[in-house]
Image: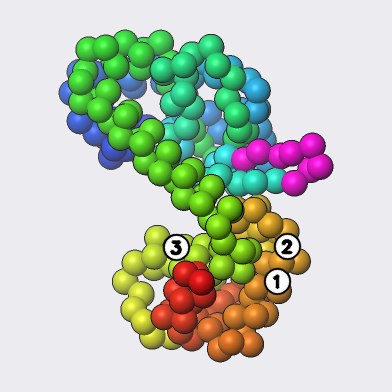
């Protein structure tokens, strides 16, 4: 897909005029990065914004002890680096790395800041996106502070199913998760061994059966009950 065909479908850009979209097309650069390649390091001051065109980008932090916390896996059409638009001199607090072979579109931050000044629809879209991310971060803080790891795992699984199998009902459901247990652990603020025990507990309780990345959910209702404990 051509970069600007995708830009028109991204909430941040879909209300722009054709003239403005053409200007973005003339200025953006498409870049391919390989799995594991760093796009942005925590502590760096970004000069561009990025749109994921294909593949997946992980946003994360690692503490001094080496424990990783994943904040998001960005899919095609999602944007990162927005902080440079409103706070251009402040270093970012998380890193970005390609989880798979990925194509991104780099867009000049100065041009986007000019858009903020002259296109109210774009400014409102940026505010809406930042507000969405603030809600996600607030929910993550609530989960880490108020729920134990097994509850967080159940909530994570229910949310993943809602996002990726929206037509799934309450009956038995088989899914293949795209993440290892270590990757799931990094998203819910724990370690792989705890995730393994969480799946074992849910198997014992008759909620699901798990074999590697393949999960057969037996009771969505009981999964949600565990998430809400």
Say if mark 2 contacts mark 3, CB within 8 Å.
Answer: no
Q: Is residue 166 left or right of residue 108?
A: left
Measuring from the top left, give residue 214's x and y in whole percent.
59, 75
Mark closest to the chain's N terminus, 1 or 3: 3
Instruction: Give the magenta range.
Output: 60-67
Residue 175 appearing in the image: no
Is there a contact, CB below 8 Å, between mark 1 and mark 3? Answer: no
Label 2 sits on residue = 192
Residue 159 marker: 3
Furthest toward the front, the residue is: 146
Question: Residue at 44% across / 63% down in the picture?
Answer: 159
Name the residue nearer the viewer: 224 or 1. 224
Where's residue 87, x and y in %?
46, 16
Of pointers 2 and 3, the one earlier in the residue sequence: 3
Q: Is residue 196 above or below residue 217?
A: above
Tell me if mark 1 has few (under 14), some (14-19) or many (20+) residues whose alpha carbon lies within 10 angstroms of its own: some
SS at mark 1? helix
How far separated are the C-alphas under marks 2 and 3? Answer: 19 Å
Q: Which residue bears the numbered disc 1? A: 196
Name the main secondary structure of what is drawn in magenta.
Answer: loop
Residue 167 vs 129, above or below: the answer is below
Do the residues bearing badges 2 and 1 touch, measured as CB atoms within 8 Å?
yes
| 70 relative to 161 in the view: left or right | right
Q: Farthest residue to the right: give it.
A: 65
Give the residue drawn at x 63%, y 20%.
44
- Residue 116 image point, x, y percent: 29, 16
- For residue 37, say whether it is visible: yes
Q: Residue at x 39, y 65 (%)?
A: 162
Q: Residues within 10 Å of mark 3 (few under 14, many from 20)?
A: some
| Inter-mark Cα distance, 2 to 1 | 6 Å
Left or right for 191, reference 87: right
The picture places residue 145, in percent across and down from the top left corner, at 58, 53
């Amino acid at each position: 897909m051509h970069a600007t065909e995708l830009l028109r479908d991204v909430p941040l850009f879909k209300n722009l005029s054709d003239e403005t979209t053409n200007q973005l097309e003339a200025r953006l650069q498409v870049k391919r990065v390989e799995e594991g390649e760093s796009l942005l390091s925590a502590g760096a001051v970004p000069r561009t914004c990025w749109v994921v065109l294909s593949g997946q980008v992980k946003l994360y932090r690692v503490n001094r002890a080496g424990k990783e916390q994943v904040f998001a896996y960005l899919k095609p059409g999602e944007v990162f680096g927005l902080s440079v638009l409103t706070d251009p001199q402040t270093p970012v607090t998380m890193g970005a790395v390609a989880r798979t072979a990925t194509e991104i579109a780099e867009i000049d931050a100065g041009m986007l800041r000019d858009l903020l000044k002259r296109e109210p629809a774009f400014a409102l879209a940026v505010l809406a996106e930042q507000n969405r991310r603030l809600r996600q971060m607030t929910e993550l803080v609530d989960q880490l502070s108020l729920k134990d790891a097994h509850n967080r795992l159940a909530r994570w699984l229910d949310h993943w199913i809602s996002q990726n199998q929206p037509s799934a009902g309450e009956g038995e459901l088989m899914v293949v998760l795209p993440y290892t247990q270590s990757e799931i652990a990094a998203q819910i603020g724990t370690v792989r061994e705890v995730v393994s025990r969480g799946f074992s507990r849910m198997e014992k309780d008759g909620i699901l059966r798990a074999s590697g990345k393949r999960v057969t959910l037996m009771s969505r209702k009981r999964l949600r009950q565990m998430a809400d404990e």
